[in-house]
Image (tube, rainbow, N blue to C red):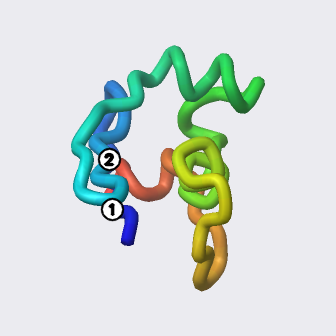
Amino acid sequence: MTTLSFDEQGVDVVYEGIEFRLERDLIEEATQKTYEDTTDHEVLKLVAEHPEIEGEPRRIGDIIDR
């Protein structure tokens, strides 16, 4: 299972028991989109080779503006 925790500066990730951080700039470079317009599904695809994606994608901008 993969866990993503979003904040203004990036994403804390737990993937297969390993914890690490993806910084905002890295996500923007990898997706060629602004951080706020990138979706949680796109970030999950950066982390996992074959991610188990459920539900509708959500923009990071919507997630952190709660």
Q: Is residue 19 left or right of residue 55?
A: left
Q: Quadrant of residue 66?
A: bottom left
Q: Quadrant of residue 50?
A: bottom right
Residue placed under numbered mark 1 in the picture: 3
In the rendered image, the quadrant that contains the N terminus is bottom left
**Sequence-earlier tag: 2 or 1:** 1
Place of residue 53 in the rendered image (x, y in percent of width and height, measured from the top left): 61, 75
Say how many tags the image has: 2
The residue drawn where x is 35% and y is 49% is: 64
The residue drawn where x is 62% and y is 60% is: 41
Place of residue 34 in the rendered image (x, y in percent of width and height, measured from the top left): 64, 27
Q: Is residue 7 left or right of residue 56?
A: left
Element at badge 1? strand
Place of residue 16 in the rendered image (x, y in percent of width and height, measured from the top left): 33, 59
Q: Is residue 33 left or right of residue 16?
A: right
Mark 2 in CB contact with mark 1 (< 8 angstroms)? yes
Element at badge 2? strand
- Which amino acid lies under the numbered mark 2 shown in the image of this protein? Val
Judging depth in this view, the residue of 55 and 47 nearest the camera is: 47
Judging depth in this view, the residue of 35 and 29 nearest the camera is: 29
The disc at residue 20 is none
Identify whether 18 is placed above or below 4.
above
- Which amino acid lies under the numbered mark 1 shown in the image of this protein? Thr
Q: Is residue 34 left or right of residue 19?
A: right
Residue placed under numbered mark 2 in the picture: 13
Identify whether 54 is placed above or below 10.
below
Q: CA distance from mark 2 to mark 1?
A: 6 Å
The residue drawn where x is 64% and y is 68% is: 57
